[in-house]
C-alpha cells in the first residue's frame, strides 16, 4: 500500500482563504464528523462539478495540494472540506484528524482554525 508523502502535500492557501470567506459569509453546515461520509461529494458529483466549473474551482474545495502530481487529476487534491456549496463542519473535523495522523502540520493547523471559526459563528 502506498502512503502519501507528507512533504509532497502542501496547504492550498487559496482554498484556505476560500473556506474562511465561506465561513464568514455564513455558508456553513454545522454537522458532525459522522455526517461527512454521507455529505462528502461522490465521484459523480465531483465530475459534474469539474465539467461545470473546471480545475481551478475544484482546487478551492481542497486544502491539500500535491504539486508533484499532474495538474488536471483528482489525485493532485486532498482534504476536501465542503460539498461544493458550503463548508461542512463534519468534513473539517474528518480532515483535521487525517491530516494530524499523516503529519501534515500546516493543513492540520488550517483545519483547526476553520473549526474554531465555525464553532465561534
Image (spheres, helix red, strand yellow):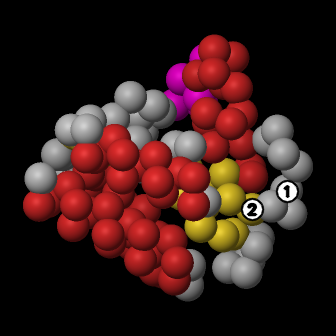
Circle 2 sits on which residue? Answer: 66
Instruction: Find numbered disc 2 in the image and state the secondary structure of the residue it sits on.
Output: strand
- Where does the image place residue 15, in percent across and percent down from the top left? 53, 51
Q: Which residue is mark 1?
A: 69
The answer for how far apart the CA atoms under marks 1 and 2 are is 6 Å
The magenta stretch is 42-48
Picture quadrant of residue 37 = top left
Q: Are marks 1 and 2 in contact (CB under 8 Å)?
A: yes
Residue at 14% across, 60% down:
119
Please tell me whether residue 43 is drawn above or below residue 7 in the rendered image.
above
Q: Quadrant of residue 47?
A: top right
Residue 81 located left or right of residue 9? left
Q: Position of residue 118 (x, y in %)?
A: 20, 55
Task: Name the residue nearer the viewer: 54 or 83.
Answer: 54
Q: Say what secondary structure mark 1 lies in.
A: loop
Quick check: is 22 in the magenta stretch? no
Amino acid at each position: 500500500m502506498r502512503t502519501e508523502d507528507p512533504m509532497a502535500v502542501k496547504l492550498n492557501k487559496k482554498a484556505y482563504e476560500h473556506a474562511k470567506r465561506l465561513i464568514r459569509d455564513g455558508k456553513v453546515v454545522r454537522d458532525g464528523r459522522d455526517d461527512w461520509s454521507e455529505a462528502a461529494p461522490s465521484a459523480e458529483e465531483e465530475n459534474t462539478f469539474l465539467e461545470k466549473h473546471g480545475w481551478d474551482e475544484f482546487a478551492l474545495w481542497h486544502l491539500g495540494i500535491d504539486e508533484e502530481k499532474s495538474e488536471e487529476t483528482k489525485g493532485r487534491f486532498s482534504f476536501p472540506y465542503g460539498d461544493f456549496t458550503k463548508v461542512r463542519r463534519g468534513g473539517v473535523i474528518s480532515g483535521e484528524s487525517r491530516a494530524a495522523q499523516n503529519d501534515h502540520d500546516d493543513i492540520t493547523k488550517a483545519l483547526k482554525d476553520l473549526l474554531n471559526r465555525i464553532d465561534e459563528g
